[in-house]
Image: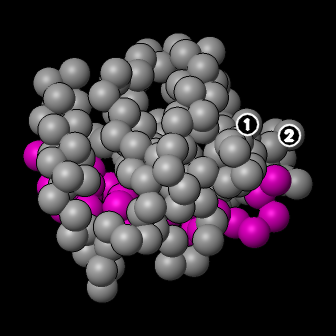
Amino acid sequence: MITIIAGTNRPGSNSEKIANFYNKYTPEESQVLCLKDLPRDFVFTDTYGEGSTEFNKIVNDKIVNADKFIFIIPEYNGGFPGILKAFIDAVHPKNFHNKKAALVGLSSGHTGALRPLDQFSDILHYLKVEVLSAKPKLSGVELLIKEDQLIDERALSLLNDQIDRFSKF
């Protein structure tokens, strides 16, 4: 099972649109976790061990039961979103150990979230997660999507290549 994580809690985000693309085209069984669907107060309740039933269900269904992850990571202020870090911190590290991940970077700017991908790779390595070397960086992402569909041929090629490589990883 692959869990595809849209790494922001922004409603209607491009991360969610790209996550849905992956969910549609990944040949393995997959599911999407949008961080906008996390309990609103999880940072104050679940981060320090006071696990709520709702948060624990999300972790069990989407993290514990997954063998692989695809993280769709938008660039926020030169890094990745704080909500993604808070989520990772709220999940016990053992739930990530010895799993695999693929990363995709999104940005409005020209770097395609290069720095956030590097930062997040380091965190995953700390959590004993193997990270696929192919990390597509989608620059000017709002120009690559029309009516919630990815329309850019180069981006489609990069993502399809990553999907193929990740299925063999």
Query: Which mark is on residue 104?
Result: none
Q: Is residue 75 above or below residue 145?
A: above
Name the side, left or right, on which 145 lies relative to 47: left
Viewer-proximal residue, 37 or 154?
154
User: Few, some or many C-alpha atoms within 10 Å of disc 2 (few <14, some 14-19, many ≥20)?
Assistant: few
The C terminus is located in which quarter? Answer: top left
Measuring from the top left, give residue 27's x and y in whole percent: 11, 46
Query: Which mark is on residue 48?
Result: 2
Upstream in sequence: badge 1 or badge 2: 2
Rendered image quadrant of residue 10: bottom right
Which portion, as a residue range, is magenta? 16-43
Viewer-proximal residue, 16 or 37?
16
User: Few, some or many C-alpha atoms within 10 Å of disc 1 (few <14, some 14-19, many ≥20)?
Assistant: some
Residue bearing the label numbered 1: 89
Magenta includes 36? yes
Residue in the image at 52% along x and 36% along y? 114
Residue in the image at 81% along x and 53% along y? 43
Q: Is residue 42 visible?
A: yes
Residue type at mark 2? Tyr
Measuring from the top left, give residue 5's x and y in whole percent: 46, 51
| SS at circle 2 | loop
